[in-house]
Image: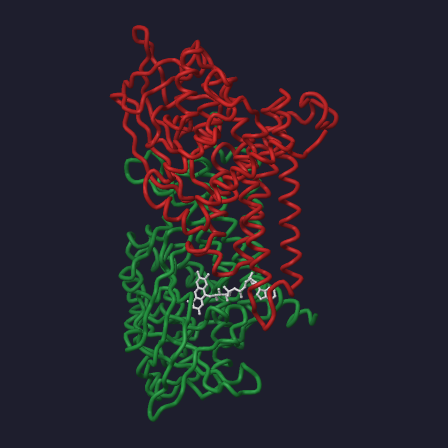
Amino acid sequence: MNFDYDSEQDDLREAVRGLLSRAYADSEQRRTVVKTDPGFDEKTWTRLAEMGLLGLPFAEEDGGMGAGPIEVAIVAEEIGRVLAPEPFIETVVLAGGLIAAVGTAEQKGELLGGISEGATIAVFAHAEPGTRWTPTAEGVTATQSGDGWTLTGVKEPVPSGARADVLIVSAAIDGGTGLFLVQGDASGLTRTGYRTHDGTRAANVRFEGTAAVALGAGGDQTAAIERALGEARIAYGHEAIGAMDTALRTTAEYLKTRKQFGVTLNKFQALTFRAADMYVSLELARSTALWASMVQDCGGDVVSAADRARLQVSRAGRHIGKEAIQLHGGIGVTAEYSVGHYTSRLTAIDHLLGDGDWAADRLAATVTSYETVDPLGAPYA
Amino acid sequence: MRLQLSPELEAFREEMRTFFTTQVPQEIRDTVAAHRHVSKEQYVETQRVLDAAGLAVPHWPVEWGGRDWTPLQRHIWREEMQLANVPEPLAFNTSMIGPVIAAFGNQEQKERFLPKTANLDIWWCQGFSEPDAGSDLASLRTTAVRDGDDWVVNGQKTWTTLGQHADWIFCLVRTDPGAEKKQRGISLLVFPMDSPGVTLRPIELIDGGFEVNEVFFEDVRVPAENLIGEENRGWDYAKFLLGNERVGIARVGSTKSMLAEAKQHAREVSVGGRPLADDPRMAARIAELENELLALELTALRVAANSADGKPHPASSVLKLRGSELQQAATELLVDIAGPLSLASFADDGSDVPDWARVATPHYLNYRKVSIYGGSNEVQRTIIAGSILGL
Ligand SMILES: Cc1cc2nc3c(=O)[nH]c(=O)nc-3n(C[C@H](O)[C@H](O)[C@H](O)COP(=O)(O)OP(=O)(O)OC[C@H]3O[C@@H](n4cnc5c(N)ncnc54)[C@H](O)[C@@H]3O)c2cc1C
């Protein structure tokens, strides 16, 4: 049991931090980037690819780096630290994760190679206006036609859905939910992109008899989707940790410099105690997120560990996000100052793949089936 | 003690409800209900409808359009207005500068300003806060120096809400830099926003909206007659004004409408084949919020029923503190009901996500302000601890 990074992981973190802190040296740079489509910086995306980060978790024979979830977590945390808007988790963890898990050898070679090189942006089109954080699909249906498939229905909101070169789409099939590949230029595909409150982009994606290819062997993929969503929840947890860390640091710094009533705000114990409570929330969430990545790394029950991390991170994100604004006073709600954007992003992360109440409900459903939670024992290790 | 309203008050409540729901244009009330941006024209139109019916400034002296209502009547008036999603009469006019001019202005100022203030012919904005004077308002630095028949104003204000719509500003300025206590050297000046030397810079907020501004003053000449009350007594007027501001700030009626709206949407959103409203956790969360709000409403009624002399009740800080927390909790609830749909925040009409779910997060982010302005929640706790508990 060891929560420390090894020296290679430390190096990775330093390298990613270096790259991202140059790309987003201040919040003004991020604001400029998120103002125009596609809502992230294509050059930064290329640099992430050059550093090997976009192929991090994929097998070397598929063009990847063969690294694991801890390395992914390191990158995600650095992304959160500066609120880099590049769709790393969407493309690499979620869409890439699904391709790696169920794709045919040929699909893996082609798509994962493209993602790793930064040439292909793939996203998972899964959320539907009528459902809420389920691993299944209802609103988009797939029909077999010849040796291919066609899709009909609507997915929304799809993160980076308008910019993506390839969509991995979940769709209802006989007896379950299948996964399909749709090319961005397919006929019968309409994508309407828009800005989300956190500066990133999402889209309404409409399928009208759109040609699609089954991902992998076909059939019901609900279990694979559940697992990929779990892995993405863990990664978003790390992104949130990075964001919370910056929000807390920024707040502590502000309390030391802002003067009211002739003294700096840190002279008011009522405020310093609240900053201390933010730190407590952050560290408890950090431990849980790190643990969940380790569970994933050693092949434990990712879905359950992800739910536990999600619950802790969600509660911490809300606590820290709200307090960061409040302790700043008026400047905290301005677009020019960074701290409100951190709160906005934390709010978005919370609602992307399941919020704290949702995770608590899933955990609640199983509490009578075990005696105690042992983070080092079955089913986690 | 008696629970029921008297038949007269019951009738009064009915009268208010009928007026607000039939005389204020539906389109304007729909805009408020949808948490969409209320335009200047919509504010003006509403306030003129209210003023014509004697409902814009019932709390002012009768001579200037007041109704001599009891605090309980005023409470009912305000609650019914919020429940009907009527944009409230502009607080800067009706709760802030109007009552101050009525109480401390000279006859000429009353005649010149009060009717236009009630009818929103003049749109006022509040120039109190400065970059280094927020919670610590008394340390403001904007100066006014006497030069012949004018005051010459230099300095900067910030957070000036809706200053872009304003015709006039009421401003706290330092007129005696040498005063022993910094509270003692402050005066209250009013002047037009288009006076030479006034510039306005909008500030964008995190929801993407523009409702606050920085305002800069460079050698702005203000006629001496625009001083309200006595020179160097501005702090007393500011305290009077802020006390008034706090009374209406619980916004129980508006939170009630949000909770009703939340229930409506929770019935429409389905999770695993059943309405989210049937989820025990969601139902319990709504019930708890409703109960907190009930406690707040009862406290507001207690305060209203007991403050016959017109002075703010000591518990008015409770109303601001809890009222702002509950407004924020209601906006957060709406985001959580929207869930993943809340991400479609700036989608246009091509979206399959309903409008309420799209505005949910920007509205939630915007409402972080309510625990900051009008005396932050920390300041309210300091008041409770200090003035009420003697700590
Ligand atoms: C949306 C919005 C609209 C506004 N509209 C107007 C307007 O129209 N006109 C106008 O004049 N002003 C307006 N304000 C300004 C508002 O009144 C101030 O923001 C408020 O007084 C807080 O000041 P500040 O922002 O400088 O925060 P600060 O005073 O710097 O406070 C920062 C944090 O420290 C806390 N704090 C400060 N002092 C203490 C203390 N002694 N003990 C414990 N905690 C403390 C505060 O509560 C806050 O959490 C508006 C503000 C906002 C956000």
- Residue B264 image point, x, y percent: 43, 40
Residue furthest out toward the bottom: B148
Q: Nearer the viewer, residue B32 or B386?
A: B386
Question: Dividing the picture into quarters, in which one does residue B390 lie?
Answer: bottom right
Q: Going 45% across and 85% down the picture, which residue do you hit?
A: B175
Q: Total number of numbered labels?
A: 0
Q: Nearer the viewer, residue B82 or A23?
A: A23
Q: Going 51% across and 26% down the picture, which residue do you hit?
A: A56
The colour assigned to chain A within the rendered structure: red
Q: Quadrant of the N terminus of chain B?
A: bottom right
Of all chains in the rendering, the one displayed in green is: B
Q: Going 46% across and 64% down the picture, which residue do you hit?
A: B9
Q: Nearer the viewer, residue B347 or B70?
A: B347
Residue furthest out toward the top: A146
User: Vertical placement of A230 versus B297: above or below?
Assistant: above
- Residue B337 image point, x, y percent: 47, 39
User: Vertical placement of A291 versus A83: above or below?
Assistant: above
- Residue A273 image point, x, y percent: 67, 56
User: Vertical placement of A186 versus A290: above or below?
Assistant: above
Residue furthest out toward the right: A371
* Residue B86 shown left or right of residue A311 in the figure: left
User: Vertical placement of B10 versus A112: above or below?
Assistant: below
- Residue A225 image point, x, y percent: 49, 21
Question: Dividing the picture into quarters, in which one does residue B69 lie?
Answer: bottom left
Q: Quadrant of the C terminus of chain B?
A: bottom right
